Amino acid sequence: MISKIVVPNLGATGADVTLVSWLVKTGDYVKAGSPLFSVSTDKAEMEVEAFKDGYLRKILADPGSVVELGEEVAIISDSMEESLPIVIRKSQSLTANRKSTQPKSQSGPEAIVSSHRRSPSTPTQDPHDKLTVDGLLGMFRRMVLIRRFEDYLHQLFLQGLVPGTLHQCQGQEAVAVGVCATLRRDDVMFSTHRPVGHFLAKGTSARSIAAEIWGKATGCAGGKGGQMHLVDVAAGAMPSNAIVGANIPIATGAAIGFRLRGLERIAVSFFGDGTTNIGAFHEGINLAAIKDAPVVFVCENNLYAASTHVSLTMRISEIAERAKAYGIPGRSVDGMDVIAVYDSMAEAVSRARQGGGPTLLEYKTYRYAGHSRGDPGGYRKKDEVQKWRQSDPISRARKSLIEEYQQNASDLDDLEQACQEEVEEAVRFAQASPDPTTESCFGPVYAQRGPT
Amino acid sequence: MGSRKMTMVEALRDAMRLAMRSDSSVFILGEDVGVSGGFGGGFTVTLGLSDDFGHERVMDTPISETAIIGAAVGAAMTGMRPIAEMQYGDFVFCGMDQVVNQAAKMHYMSNGQVKVPMVLRLPVGATTRGAQHGQSTEAWFMHTPGLRVVCPSNPYDAKGLLLASIRDENPVIFLEHKLLYGSKGGRKERTSLDPLAEVPEEDFEVPLGTVAIKREGRDVTLLANMLMVHRALEAAAELELEGISAEVIDVRCLAPLDIDTILESAKKTTRVVIVEEDNLTGGWGAEVAARLAQSAFYYLDKPITRVAAPDTPLPCAASLERAYVPSAQRVIEEVRHLLRD
């Protein structure tokens, strides 16, 4: 549950008080009754306490700012996974200056930037200027969560503790996170057999994913899906698809439906380099193109279709070139740079939302792990893996946060540690959850018709 | 509102028009379905609908069966009620992944989080076009959990079943026999039956999961669908002259299957002949026979008999096709054989 923290009536005579300082930081778990922030009124300086337990998710008023009684100054929630409403702070510029020497913002990592379109009044040469520190921190946190989740699962897998299959995405986090950060909650995302990163990026809880992998009743699909078939419709994460290419026409259809109804929603299809050779890719993108469907096609080119190198499956070096065949824009982008992913995706999303039709985005990325469990990746040279690891998306975002956004390394360490704890807690939850009932095997095969 | 005589094509078109008027989430997509000056899909079923509803809601597509079905799946999963058309039922195999792996499984795989309320219309039946333009494909879908399979034999059922299918919350495979359409002009089939029927002009539904007893009888039960219903009725009329009373049941919906009505009839007549246009092996008749064997075995006086197409691809020549597709005469002979001693 999301709760707002407002400035209480402090018995002040004036309508406004000054928020002096925050006593907790974003991501902290606060207990009811513990102090959250201090304010000064015309009478005194005092501390305001939390009225309930929860995670401090977002701070909406900076220290030193004047706030009204009853004004919302922060958001807390029962879990770190609940999506926050987008709040635009009227008083603040949404555009962070990467080179600024402003004091470190205390705003939290959850605030995925609310303005990805460049304001016409603030033209800038540097596309990175579009990202606030909150935005980058939010994406950093998501990437770390994915990496920790996948690494922890791998560790457990090696101990024989993970049931079912496993398709991991270490190395590809920037694509999942940069793409999903540009989406609204009701935009729909169609994922693949390697869905964990996409789902964590779109806002599905680590708990429900872990429980699904463990085949438990508490899993996002009640144990019916497994690792390849995650689903979280409330978060706009549609059932992930383990048939290569199948989600391309499906995403197109969702987008066509949105357009027919005059909705501003868009659809996103994730797929790999191998998918661009299957017929559904051609049919789906072509149909989307001729119908101006609001859909973005996101190719995660990790160079390998299972074990087969991309050079063995096509004669072009840039998959984005295939966009030309459909008369739509196509771009090849560094998929190890979350900011570049974010920027390119934001542009494609904006085009789709404004009726400009689909875009094919190729993100050049790499999966550190094998294709699936039991694939040690013997078809790749060690130095190739090493080379890609040197442009690790998480390391790069971290460097950027410290050097350009003036973030404190130890705060980032804390954030990483919090992600680790979240992941381990999610797995404990999964392991402790009950198996689905035997009866649940038999349904639901058919949806029931409601009253007409 | 009264009723009027309609062909199957008119009844189907009427159903789609009513559904589109009453629900803005209903739209049509397929090849040649809405082209101005075109022919309204393979068999004129959608003729004129793009004039009424525009080219957005009667959406022409490229020759891309995977994309047609896949787009219907995606639209259905996110709030629409698409009606997708295959120009010929045989072409569904180009998009079979979207039917079997996607449409049919999404509700279950997502543990009920999504539903796929779509209709996939398939013109079927042998019409001297050979092996790739005339198959009866219903058994492929009856085997797949998650799909409804509907196969009307007459204009009244066509309208009522199509309206019920559009409003069902699941993917419905809706088979239409080309010899029953009553298409006009250049799209008319030379050997077509084109049944006309009095069909209410109002909005009505025939519930899915029902069969229809077309003729009551005492001595034998004939189970048939689509064109074969007409062959069975022709056989029953002929058999009556010989003093044999045949009950004819139109199995107009294969999934869900109203096995109870079928069992009841079988127990009454003690003899069953299943008439299907599909190949013999693994056809819908095989499933019905198995269920009869399990649940009505002790009531039956004679082995359950199937009259079906042989296990070969469909030939093209009219003479060969006549030999291939079950005729009323073959049904009569099988019944006579069953009643001989």
Image: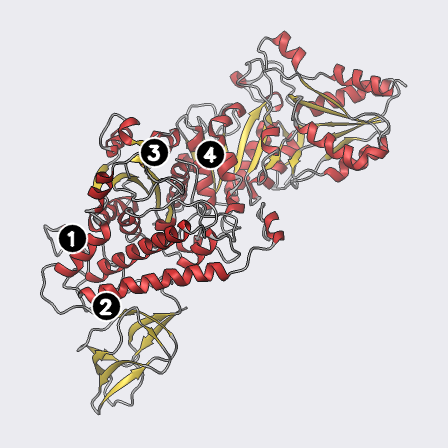
What residue did someone put label 1 on?
A: A128
Q: Which mark is residue A300?
A: none
- Measured in 3D between alpha carbons, the distance from the residue under mark 3 to the one under mark 2, in whole angstroms, is 43 Å
Left or right of residue A147: residue A115: left
Point out which mark residue A307 bears. Answer: 3
Residue placed furthest toward the front: A159
Is residue A404 visible in the rendered image? The answer is no
Q: What's the distance in space between the residues labelled 3 and 1, CA to CA?
A: 35 Å
The span from disc 3 to disc 4 (Cα, nearest Å) is 30 Å
Residues marked 3 and 2 touching at CB (< 8 Å):
no
| Chain bearing mark 1 | A
Figure check: A59 above or below A193: below
For marks 1 and 2, give the CA distance. Answer: 19 Å
Q: Nearer the viewer, mark 3 or mark 2?
A: 3
Q: CA distance from mark 2 to mark 4?
A: 46 Å
Q: Earlier in the sequence, mark 1 or mark 2?
A: 2
Q: Residues within 10 Å of mark 2 (few under 14, many from 20)?
A: many
Q: Is residue B128 left or right of residue A54?
A: right
Amino acid type at image mark 3:
Ser
Does A304 appear above or below B323? below
